[in-house]
Image (cartoon, rainbow, N blue to C red):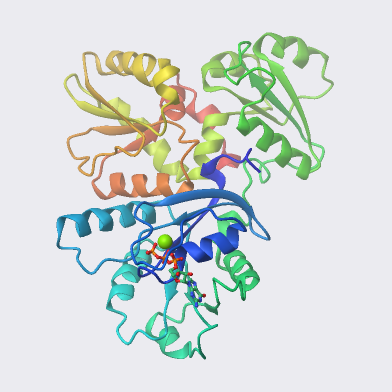
Amino acid sequence: MSKTTSGNRLHVALFGRKNIGKSTLLNALAGASASAVADSPGTTQEPLFYPMELDPVGPVVLIDTAGFEDNEHTELGGIRSRKLLEVMDQTDLALLMFMDTNEDYTLEKRWYKELANRHIPVLGIINRIDDRYVDAEPIRVQFDEIPLVKISASNRVNINRVRQSIRRTAPFEFERNTIVGDLVKPRDLVLLVTEDEMKAPRFRLPNIHSQIIRDILDQGAASLSVTETELVPTLGYLNKAPELIITDPELLEAVCAAAPPSSTVTTFSLLLARQKGNLQLLIDGAKAVDSLKPGDRVLIAEACKVHETQGETSRSLLPEQLHRKAGGALLIDVVSGLDFPADLTPYKMVLHCNACSFSRKQLMARMAKSEAQRVPFTNYGLVSAYLKGLLDRTCPEVVY
Ligand SMILES: Nc1nc2c(ncn2[C@@H]2O[C@H](COP(=O)(O)OP(=O)(O)OP(=O)(O)O)[C@@H](O)[C@H]2O)c(=O)[nH]1
Ligand SMILES: [Mg+2]
């Protein structure tokens, strides 16, 4: 379970008024005291992220949030609301909690609108059925007929129903979370080529390798892993050309040169981009390097701190290639983690890392921001393939 990167987990966030039972429900789903529960409203102040295996859904991150505020105009209220919006940008499925005793759903409607604007599926939860009989109908009609489950979080009543409903309401892509499963056929041979000096810690394979090998096995195909030095000898003794060869972006030139013409070649980075987001937008974004001129501003965005320690790509290699392509010095800003500017208009393009630690939702939210501001958005791997003239070779028809 802990092997699934947080980016591939379904992010399920709990929203609702203070004291409504959000943290109690999170603990009931987690089967553990993960979040503090108390009688006093405002117990949860900061979002809490809880990765776990949720039966029958699979790997998820449950997110507890601070209760809705009716003082958004105040400084503190404004800060809390911004945090809720940040959580919504990472949410794949929302659990919106209700009390049927509320006559007025203004607060719930205000936040439901934010969820609807982000196309986030919503599962309504009516809590505290241990206290009294609950009529769900008035809530259902006021909130676009969302599915509703009546529960008692503290008495653990109907928690299984919540689990089942999460599975039914989860977005489609989580039903078939495959990286290459749709690109290979039974009996295909897939070759995975890595650098001689692997970046993963000793005794480990990078996460994406394990996921790809699993996809290949599920399809009844075969996989073979080799280092760059062993590529040519291995191709020599195989009695058929591999249908697909997947490599690190750094080795793309060498692999393309060695690969039999009938083999499709692609990169781990491109497959991740395809799984996570809008590949066509990233491909179009990569082509924006052609219009860069000296003095243009470019944003490089890193999802996590790994790049600071292993930062050759984003901190030096990529900027060097870009300056060269533009024919003079560019102004390059590097941002990391959740620091992503709201105003992207000063930039000629945005270059993102592979975002392995981000959920699909989070990356799509950034792409949508760029698209709305008409700023090309792409990732390291695609730009590097484009600069080498190999984007067409690595984006064969089958990948779309
Ligand atoms: N009777 C009853 N009480 C509940 C139920 N669920 C939660 N409570 C109680 O309601 C109170 C608030 O529960 P929390 O889970 O802390 O509520 P919350 O929504 O996380 O509250 P904030 O973090 O303050 O926003 C606690 O005293 C819980 O024991 C329920 O199903 N029935
Ligand atoms: Mg709470």
> Is 248 left or right of 262, judged from the image as shown?
left
Give the image location of residue 259, x and y in percent: 66, 19
Give the image location of residue 194, x and y in percent: 63, 19
State whether residue 94 appears in this view. Answer: no
Relative height, residue 4 to residue 258 (above, below):
below
Please identify the quadrant where the N terminus is shown. top right
Give the image location of residue 113, x and y in percent: 32, 70
Residue at the image point whose x is 21% and y is 13% from the top: 328
**Could you say which quadrant of the image residue 168 lies in?**
bottom right
State whether residue 78 appears in this view. Answer: yes
Please identify the quadrant where the C terminus is shown. top right
Q: Ligand 1 sits in which quadrant? A: bottom left
Relative height, residue 158 to residue 175 (above, below):
below
Q: In terms of depth relative to the viewer, which is nearer, 319 or 69?
A: 69
Q: In terms of depth relative to the viewer, which is nearer, 335 or 75?
A: 75
- Total tally of numbered discs in the picture: 0
Relative height, residue 3 to residue 27 (above, below):
above
Q: In terms of depth relative to the viewer, which is nearer, 233 or 105?
A: 105
Give the image location of residue 60, x and y in percent: 57, 52
> Is 369 left or right of 141, judged from the image as shown?
left
Residue at the image point whose x is 48% and y is 46% from the top: 359
> Is 16 left or right of 172, judged from the image as shown?
left
Relative height, residue 6 to residue 104 (above, below):
above
Outermost residue toward the front in this view: 39
Residue at the image point whose x is 59% and y is 57% from the top: 30
> Is 146 left or right of 336, judged from the image as shown?
right
Q: In terms of depth relative to the viewer, which is nearer, 49 or 41?
A: 41
